[in-house]
Image: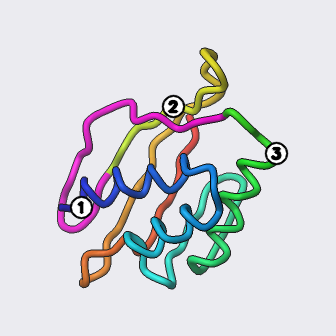
Amino acid sequence: MSEQLVLAGRCVTRAPMATKRRNLLDGVADRRIEFRDNFAAISGASDLADHIAAIHMHMPGTRLERASPARQSQGAVLIDWIARHGDEIASRGTNFFEFTPGGRIGCVFGFWS
């Protein structure tokens, strides 16, 4: 189940329209979701939706792709990713997802390689 939520969450970042992104986000994430990486420290679904919109605005054509099978343990998932811009690899890393007791994504921590 948690891997399915992570995959649905990836669809959130790919959706070009803000309303669709927000609807997808609301379907998989806790409203108090936290997202942290080298470039952001975000709390709340609304701020995360704005952050994703900024990525679409300032880095058009960049997309995240899963680079490994999900590794799951005790309500948490690790997934390696690659960010591509066209055919070029722009960056790569690993995201750690933790789930709420209700089964929604509660936090994501991104580790850039």
Instruction: Assess whether mark 3 and mark 1 are in contact (beta carbons under 8 angstroms).
Output: no
User: Upstream in the sequence, badge 2 or badge 3?
Assistant: 3
What residue sits right under mark 3 in the picture?
58
Label 2: few (<14), some (14–19) or many (≥20) C-alpha neighbours in 10 Å: some
Amino acid, disc 2: Ile
Task: Give x and y (percent) for residue 99.
Answer: 31, 72
Q: Is residue 91 above or below residue 13?
A: above
Q: Quadrant of the N terminus?
A: bottom left
Q: CA distance from mark 1 to mark 3?
A: 30 Å
Q: Is residue 101 above or below residue 5?
A: below
Amino acid, disc 1: Ser
Label 1: few (<14), some (14–19) or many (≥20) C-alpha neighbours in 10 Å: many
Task: Give x and y (percent) for residue 103.
Answer: 25, 76
What residue sits right under mark 1 in the picture?
2
Q: Is residue 102 above or below residue 36?
A: below
Amino acid, disc 3: His
**Residue 75 lies in magenta, yes or no?**
yes
Task: Give x and y (percent) for residue 64.
Answer: 53, 38
Q: CA distance from mark 2 to mark 3?
A: 18 Å
The residue most toward the top is 87
State which mark lies toward you, 1 or 3: 3
Q: Is residue 60 above or below residue 19?
A: above
Q: Residue at x 25, y 53 (%)?
A: 3
The residue most toward the right is 58
Q: CA distance from mark 2 to mark 1?
A: 20 Å
What residue sits right under mark 2 in the picture?
82
Label 3: few (<14), some (14–19) or many (≥20) C-alpha neighbours in 10 Å: few
Q: Is residue 112 left or right of residue 53?
A: left
- Which range of residues does the magenta coloring cover? 62-77
User: Upstream in the sequence, badge 1 or badge 3?
Assistant: 1
